[in-house]
Structures are given as C-alpha cells and as structure tokens.
Image: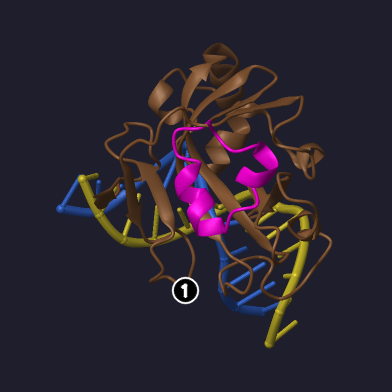
Chain colours: A brown, B yellow, C blue
Amino acid sequence: MPPRSDEFFAQDAVSLAAALIGCELYLDGVGGRIVETEAYRAGDAASHSFRGETLRNRAMFGPIGRAYVYRSYGLHWCLNIVCDGTEPGSAVLLRALEPLAGLDAMGRRRGLDEPRLLCAGPGRLTQALGIDAGHDGLAIDEPPFLFRQAAAPGPVGVGPRIGITKAIDEPWRFGLAGSRYLSRPLRNVSG
DNA sequence: TCGTTGATATTCT
DNA sequence: GAATATCAACGAC
C-alpha cells in the first residue's frame, strides 16, 4: 500500500528524490514518468532556500506537496516539489520525464519531434508541459496536475548534481538506470 | 564530438 | 557588477 501523498511529500528531500523515480506527473493530461531528479535540502548551500526566504523562493517555505517554479538563467522555468515537513526550505528539482501522454502538444511547444529531447532537462521539461510562474505554489497532486506514485521501485542510479558550484560532491541526483530520457547519463546503480 | 557563446531574471556583493 | 539548479546555435577539429 503506497503512503498517502501528504506523508509521501513529508520525506527528506534526498529520500523523496529517489522515491520520485518511476512516479508519473501530468499537467492537463500532458506528461509522463519521472526519470531524473535532484534533492535540495534545507541548510544545503546549493539550495535557493539557503539564504532565507525571498519573493522568488517563497513557495519553498510554504506547504509541502506544492510546486516551486522559478526562472533559471533569465529564460527557462524549472519545476520543484516542496517537501520535508520537519524544516522549511526543502525541495526536489524535476530534471527529466519519459513522455507518455500529450506528445503532440509537447512537440508543438518544443518545436521538435524527437521524443528523447522533449523533456530531457529541467528547462525542456517545463517548456514541454507548459509550466510557468502561474503554476508556482499549486498542489502537485491536484488539478491541473495529476500525480501518480510509482507502482514498484525501479533500478535507481545516483550521481552528482548538475550546474551548481556549491556542495558539488553530494550525490543527490537520481535517475532511472538505463533510461534513454535522462538529461545526462548516470553512474552507480542501486535498488 | 567538442568547446564557446548568447539570451537575460533574480539575487547577492 | 557578478553569479546562476539552462538550452541551443555555431564553428573548429
């Protein structure tokens, strides 16, 4: 029996990041299987929450199970799920999906046909699903989102996080081992 | 296949 | 003014 979703998102960011691999996420019926995530803990020097609450990261300090959407490098949107009820400021970044539904809509938004490139990266994922600032703070398991927990754990690989300069040695990037839809390949496999 | 670079919001120094 | 949880286009090999 899978845990209720409020308990599921109450996990520590690192364990939730691993548990999210194989779960499914859709927005207005467009989405697929989560194949790549990164954990950002409260007190983590690489996390946006590290220096306290600002207008941008406000959602990270709000209720768990909500979306934290921010603009990256001035042009891309990135989607996180706020988690860990014990201390505010934790979230899991969704880095890649395996597209399962709404491939045509994704292709239109991305200007591409190649399924492998539709959602392989945090900026690509949000563009394919049509996620922007309007989704910041919305519950990830209520309409227009649809969230389904993984039926069974898959082979989860681990690696260092990408694109950061602080706490770079923490192996807090997780992915579905062997998936073609990762933004970049993984190394070690466990589970 | 690889490295470089442009686009440019938000925060920090 | 500099850095950043990125992506795609481009030129050199």
**Quick check: A152 left or right of B8?**
left
Residue A13 within the magenta-colored segment of the rendering: yes
Residue drawn where x is 70% and y is 58% of the image: A85
Is residue B12 placed above or below A13 in the rendered structure?
below
**Quick check: C1 left or right of B3?**
right
Q: Position of residue A132 (x, y in %)?
A: 73, 38
Residue drawn where x is 77% and y is 25% of the image: A143
Of A77 and A51, the residue lying toward us: A51
Residue drawn where x is 45% and y is 36% of the image: A120
Of A104 and A179, the residue lying toward us: A179
Residue A64 within the magenta-colored segment of the rendering: no
**Quick check: A61 left or right of A43?**
right
Q: Is residue A59 visible?
A: yes
Residue drawn where x is 54% and y is 36% of the image: A124
Q: Position of residue A103 (x, y in %)?
A: 52, 15
Residue behind mark 1: A167
Residue bounds of the magenta highlight: A1-23
What element does badge 1 sit on?
A: loop
Is residue A96 placed above or below B7 in the rendered structure?
above
Q: In the picture, residue A138 is in which quadrant? A: top right
Q: Circle 1: is it few (<14), some (14-19), or many (20+) Cα within 10 Å?
A: some
Outermost residue toward the front in this view: A1
Determine the chain carrying the residue at label 1.
Answer: A
Of C4 and B1, the residue lying toward us: C4
Q: Is residue A78 visible?
A: no
Of A130 and A167, the residue lying toward us: A167
Dot 1 amino acid type: Ala
Is residue C4 placed above or below C3 in the rendered structure?
above
Outermost residue toward the right in this view: A55
Q: Position of residue A150 (x, y in %)?
A: 48, 31
